[in-house]
Image (cartoon, rainbow, N blue to C red):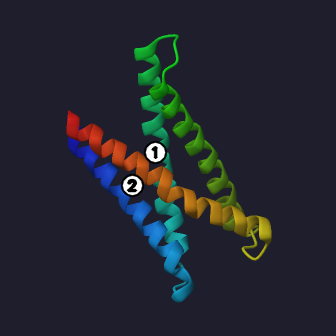
Amino acid sequence: MAALKKLLAGYMVGVAVFVAFWFVFNPFFEAPGVWDVANYLMAAALVVALAFYARRSFKEAEEIGTGVSQRCLGVDVRLYLTVGLTILFLRNWFLEISGQGDESSVPTGMVWIVVNVLVPLVVGTAGLFLWRESARR
């Protein structure tokens, strides 16, 4: 199980680094189709992050009981941020796949900017937490 966790953690950190790098340096290169592939990688990484944070949230709630702790609140904030980011990502991605999403439109473009800035933070953080968790056990 620890090997699977490390593999998933490495994947998530790799996706985070790739998205951050490509988002920053994309204006200098003309490489069509890179974002199409990156969308699949980000979707999978967001699903893993959702599962990880949901599991941690349930685990923290079970340990705490009815009380609230700072650790429990932190995990819940990360979970809800990941849920919100996943909703934004999937909406824009499905609009793009269906041909309704015009990247030149201001709202769609702004959402992609928000998604491409937050994915490395959310997915990378989840990957690092997952790596540390796999190292402890």
Tell which circle, 1 or 2, labels the residue nearer the N-terminal end. Answer: 2
Q: Residue at x 56, y 56 (%)?
A: 118
As displayed, is residue 47 above or below residue 137? below
Q: Residue at x 42, y 38 (%)?
A: 52
As displayed, is residue 64 above or below residue 135? above
In the rendered image, the quadrant that contains the C terminus is top left
Mark 2 crowdedness (10 Å alpha carbons): few <14, some 14-19, many ≥20: many
Q: Is residue 5 left or right of residue 118?
A: left
Q: Residue at x 54, y 64 (%)?
A: 39
Whether residue 34 can be seen here: no
Residue 22, image x, y percentages: 48, 74
As displayed, is residue 81 above or below residue 65? below
Q: Amino acid at mark 1?
A: Ala
The residue to which callout 2 is attached is 12
Whether residue 103 can be seen here: yes
The residue to which callout 1 is attached is 49
Q: Is residue 17 left or right of residue 87?
A: left
Mark 2: secondary structure: helix
